[in-house]
Image: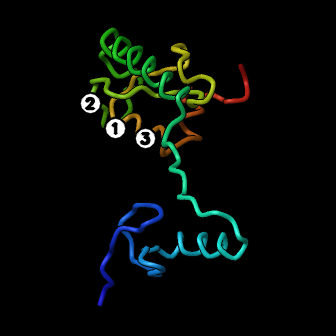
Amino acid sequence: MKAKEKICSNCGESRVIWKNYEGEKYCKYCWGATKAAMDAGKPLKPRAKIKPKSAKQSKLDIIYSQLRKIFLTDHPVCQANLAGCTHEATDVHHKKGRGKWYLVIKTWMLLCRSCHKWIEEHPIEATELGYRESKITD
């Protein structure tokens, strides 16, 4: 029999309740932190939510989306033409990875989904064919 999930008083997530203490319901993770804080005599405070993306990365993503849209419009054909190619560019492949080359268009390559999948699944062969580049060199 599976235990019913309820809302944890501390984190606000729907989880299995581990402890009901003074009318407050705690999941296993929050109860451990709450118990440790009570034992240490510290005031209780809810866990802070971690943002999925920083403000800086969000700004970069907006710029990337605009550049990607223009780039795909200007170059509608797959640049790899590997076996199973559909010839319609739908993906932007970052030959040097995303990191510091995220917005550098000269490291981009437009590919169809099947060619992009092949390049990601066969890194050694893709490097030999020039579809991947070392992240170390500038």
At 46% from the left and 61% from the top, the residue drawn is 11
Spatial separation of the CA atoms under disc 3 and disc 1: 6 Å
| Structural crowding at the residue carrying mark 2, measured as other residues with C-alpha within 10 Å and reported as few (<14), some (14–19) or many (≥20) | some
Q: Which of the two labelled residues, at mark 2 and mark 3, occupies the earlier sequence position?
A: 2
**Mark 3 residue type:** Trp
User: Residue 94 placed where, x, y %?
Assistant: 51, 27
Q: Secondary structure at mark 2?
A: loop
Total labels drawn: 3
User: From what the image shows, is residue 56 above or below residue 75?
Assistant: below
| Structural crowding at the residue carrying mark 3, measured as other residues with C-alpha within 10 Å and reported as few (<14), some (14–19) or many (≥20) | some
Q: Which of the two labelled residues, at mark 2 and mark 1, occupies the earlier sequence position?
A: 2
At 31% from the left and 32% from the top, the residue drawn is 85
**Mark 1 residue type:** Ser
Q: Quadrant of residue 72?
A: top left
Label ID, residue 86: 2
The C terminus lies in which quarter of the figure?
A: top right
Q: Given contact means CB atoms under 8 Å apart, are the residues at marks 2 and 1 in contact?
A: yes
User: Residue 95 placed where, x, y %?
Assistant: 55, 27
Q: Which residue is mark 3?
A: 118
Q: Secondary structure at mark 3?
A: helix
Q: Residue furthest bottom?
A: 1
Left or right position of 116 against 56: left
Q: Given contact means CB atoms under 8 Å apart, are the residues at marks 3 and 1 in contact?
A: yes
| Structural crowding at the residue carrying mark 1, measured as other residues with C-alpha within 10 Å and reported as few (<14), some (14–19) or many (≥20) | some
Spatial separation of the CA atoms under disc 2 and disc 3: 13 Å
Left or right position of 23 against 125: left
User: From what the image shows, is residue 45 above or below residue 128?
Assistant: below
User: Residue 64 placed where, x, y %?
Assistant: 45, 20
Nearer to me, 52 or 98: 52
